[in-house]
Image (cartoon, rainbow, N blue to C red):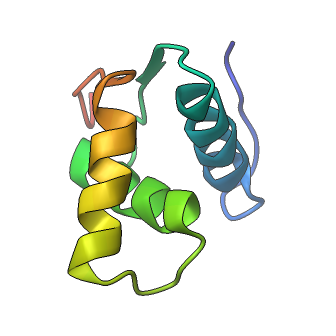
Amino acid sequence: TIVTGTNGHGKSMLLGQLCVHLCKLGERVCMFSGEMPPKTVLKRMVRQHQEAGAPCPEQIANAIGALNEGLFFFDLVGN
């Protein structure tokens, strides 16, 4: 699936939430963003997983553990 549109309209937020949900269901997901590095995408997904704007270290570890088995990144930013 490819999702395109104008900047700032929630595409990354929607897809991040969808991927978090799929990982919780045990599905495998590959993420790619041509604008944000995987580290930035993962930070956002950790907040989505924990439903917290500033998760504590324990919440971060919990989210990483939950996403670890099913989340993969295609790491290419730019041209």
The residue under the point 38% across, 81% down is 55
Residue 69 placement, left or right of 35? left
Residue 56 position (above or below residue 61): below
Q: Quadrant of the N terminus?
A: top right
- Residue 37 in view of the camera: no
* Residue pictured at 28% horizontal, 44% vertical: 65
Q: Nearer the viewer, residue 71 or 6?
A: 71
Q: Quadrant of residue 30?
A: top left
Q: Which quadrant of the view contains residue 31?
A: top left
Instruction: Provide residue 67's location: percent of width, then percent of height.
Output: 38, 37
Give coordinates of residue 66: x percent, y percent.
Answer: 38, 41
Total labels: the figure holds 0
Residue at (23, 52) in percent of width and height: 39
Quarter of the rendering occupied by the C terminus: top left
Q: Residue at x 70, y 47 (%)?
A: 11
Of 6 and 60, nearer the camera is 60
Across and down, in percent, residue 64 comes to 28, 49
Q: Closer to the camera, 39 or 5?
A: 39
Residue 23, above or below 58:
above
Q: Position of residue 47 (x, y in %)?
A: 48, 68
Nearest to the observer: residue 28 or residue 41: 28
Instruction: Judge left or right: residue 64 versus residue 4.
Output: left
Residue 3 appearing in the image: yes
